[in-house]
Amino acid sequence: MPEAYRKTLIRQISQHAHSEVVGMLPEGNWITRAPSLRRKVALLAKIQDEAGHGLYLYSAAETLGISREELYNELLSGKAKYSSIFNYPTLTWADMGAVGWLVDGAAIMNQVALCKCSYGPYARAMVRVCKEESFHQRQGFELLLTLSKGTPEQHAMAQDAINRWWWPSMMMFGPNDSDSPHSAQSMRWKIKRYSNDTLRQKFVDMIAEQIKVLNMTLPDPDLRWNEERGHYDFGTIDWTEFNEVLKGNGPCNRERLAARRKAWEEGAWVREAAMAHAAKRQQSF
Ligand code: FAQ
């Protein structure tokens, strides 16, 4: 395996794994405040799925000759990246719908292509991840649909969540192709099968239709169908905001890393107990 190919895969798969793990935090914020038992069960199951996705992805990265500990240290030290989207706060219950519909929606758009990428362990992990993510997206949409048919206050709360999550979701696909340093090589290696802009456009075309069913709007005055292109046109993304979030200056960057570090420290006894149990079992064989 060419060294540069290996390194690129470790970079992308580990960032992806970290995103799944940090991605549990914004939704974890609402478990104790879910408005019904049905909603609480669904939210718990979704968050548990994200933990599982992190585990498949760390395992896929380990096949490339890096240890889980090294990967995790890079996250906790702040060296490794994770998706920009998880540095935004979840302010109301409607955010659970917007995260499911928009964030999982953007994640699937990117990940379906990865199911056929050139590295088997990554591609195979993605097959199951995509099945679960598509379920997540539907639960988010169903949650928003319920709010959209509720009281005027509930409708307004859902619209506000969509307004806040729309542009950060668009940024999940990464910089424009002209500013994406890794895209050309990753596409030659068939790690990436579609460019950042191609996937972003597919996402806009999908969401611009689905929002009509919700009887809501996207916060983009430039959004309109372009007959000639056969796609929706959309406004300019605020790349200054994106770059600030990547530099660690998003609304929740510090809070997210502090939460992961705390979990790591407080979980030390579990790791020690698991190691002691494994050693004891080995002795008895
Ligand atoms: N956030 O040259 P490119 C989820 C970085 S999973 C942060 O275009 P590349 C599930 C990029 O790493 C969401 N950094 O890079 C869920 C690079 O930095 P580096 C995660 C970003 O790799 C839902 C630099 O910018 N999904 O949501 C971002 O070819 C709900 C230059 O960019 C994946 O990771 C960003 N948004 O393309 C969980 C999918 N965009 O490494 C819980 C796999 C770019 O040089 C709740 N990853 N950067 O320091 C990919 O497909 C690719 O890595 C891209 C970026 C498309 C993200």
Image (tube, helix red, strand yellow):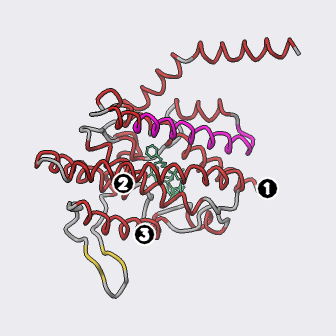
Residue at label 3?
202
Q: Secondary structure at mark 2?
A: helix
**The furthest residue to the left:** 152
Q: Nearer the viewer, residue 220 or 210?
A: 210
Residue at label 1?
1
Q: Is residue 48 in the magenta section?
A: yes
Residues shaded magenta:
42-66
Q: Amino acid at mark 2?
A: Leu
Q: CA distance from mark 1 to mark 2?
A: 36 Å
Q: CA distance from mark 3 to mark 2?
A: 13 Å
Q: Residue at x 61, y 67 (%)?
A: 187
- Residue 70 relative to residue 40: left or right: right
- Residue 154 relative to residue 113: left or right: left
Above or below, 163 relative to 65: below
Q: Secondary structure at mark 3?
A: helix
Q: Main secondary structure of the magenta part?
A: helix
The answer to which quarter of the image holds residue 62 is top right
Q: CA distance from mark 3 to mark 1?
A: 32 Å
Residue 102's tag is 2
**Ligand 1: does it lie within 8 Å of the C-beta at label 2?**
no
Q: Nearer the viewer, residue 41 or 85?
A: 41
